[in-house]
Image: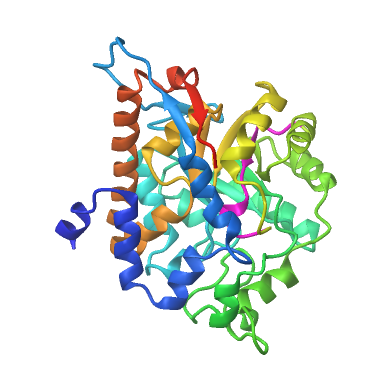
Amino acid sequence: MASTVADLLCLADVERAAAAVLPADVRDFVAGGSGTETTLDANRAALDRVFLVPRVLRDVSECSTRAELLGRPYRMPVALAPVAYQRLLHPEGELAAARAAKAAGVPFTASTLSSVPVEQLTAIGGSVWFQLYWLRDPGRSLDLVDRAADAGAEAVVLTVDVPWMGRRLRDVRNRFALPDQVRAAHLDGGPSAAHRAPSGAGSALAAHTGAAFSPALTWSAVAQVRERTRLPLVLKGVLAPEDAVRAVECGVDAVVVSNHGGRQLDGAVPSADALPAVVAAVADRCEVLLDSGVRSGTDVLRALALGASGVLIGRPPLWGLALAGERGVRHVLDLLAEELKDALGLAGCADVSTATHLRTMRATP
């Protein structure tokens, strides 16, 4: 497997190899979007429309990918996005991914729906952020904030675009449910029937999250989380500039411009298209990260040139995890770092901060 993984030269290669070995329902759970998957496809198309205007005659003999996110230094401006139930893809699940993130020098974001508890992930010793879904019992949500902080998490990432799970037709058709060995480590003390046995046609996960998540998530929840913790607070799922401004006024430290990887509102604006207006609206009052559709180091450079501080990547580490566990995730992150360094140098940027001054042009759709 080592030589096979080493022969994969880009993230698309990793995805194809992983798709070939995964059970069809798990592959669809990872790859799929909501509705007709219009937004899922549009995320890639939007990034591909962004063309960079490279600068020349600049010394790039020492080209660095290092950057700061939320006030901490990392080897590149990339964090692993929160993704649920990673033990679906490998027995070690989030443990393997978190170890790979530590080795690569980037943050790992643990999901509320992680199949490994946050305490085990922070014990690895890397940089761990904790992603929070707002639950029907606000007290349980705030208890999770405390639990993450006590475990040593370095940030809280409140996801704000999931009043309920989007209608993901691949999962509905597959009647997708969790196997016995996979559970939501932060939500129940053991196997939950709601995860595992869909009632009639549909996705058991959608039914479970519909029962657990609060559709009454409002700005009041942001204020409660902000009051509860001194950790950096990030809002994930912001697309409207007005919402980004309101987030700044609530004291958040960063927003993630994200449409949940095309898994929530089908027809939502591609994240890359929404990014520049959000950057302009916050006017350096908080960090702005991009999520949804990032598949290469060139995409990271595109995001930087459009004004982002960095990116979150969701699906690519999962493909690596499915192929070779920790080694597979590390290969994905190494490829991304190699591609980013290559893109920076060829664009005439000796470092990440210089990339924010690159001009971009957009191709006509």
* Rendered location of residue 73, percent (x, y): 45, 27
Residue at 67% in and 30% down: 277
* Rendered location of residue 78, percent (x, y): 45, 38
Residue at 84% in and 58% down: 216
Residue at 53% in and 81% down: 174
Along the line of sight, the residue nearer the viewer: 273 or 162: 273
Please determine whether, in this image, residue 278 is positioned above or below residue 155. Answer: above
Please determine whether, in this image, residue 214 is positioned above or below residue 173. Answer: above
* Rendered location of residue 255, percent (x, y): 65, 37
256 part of magenta stretch: yes
**300 left or right of 154?**
left
| Quadrant for the C terminus in the image | top right
Please determine whether, in this image, residue 4 is positioned above or below residue 71. Answer: below
Give, as a single range, the part of the protein colored magenta: 251-264
Place residue 134 in its image quadrant.
Answer: bottom right
| Quadrant for the N terminus in the image | bottom left
Could you tell me if residue 70 is visible in this image? yes
Count of labels in the image:
0
Q: Residue furthest bottom?
A: 200
Along the line of sight, the residue nearer the viewer: 361 or 326: 361
Along the line of sight, the residue nearer the viewer: 131 or 57: 57
Place residue 67 in its image quadrant.
Answer: top left
Q: Residue furthest left?
A: 3
**120 left or right of 19?**
right
13 part of magenta stretch: no
Could you tell me if residue 111 is visible in this image? no
* Rendered location of residue 26, percent (x, y): 45, 73
Along the line of sight, the residue nearer the viewer: 246 or 270: 270
Q: Residue furthest front?
A: 364
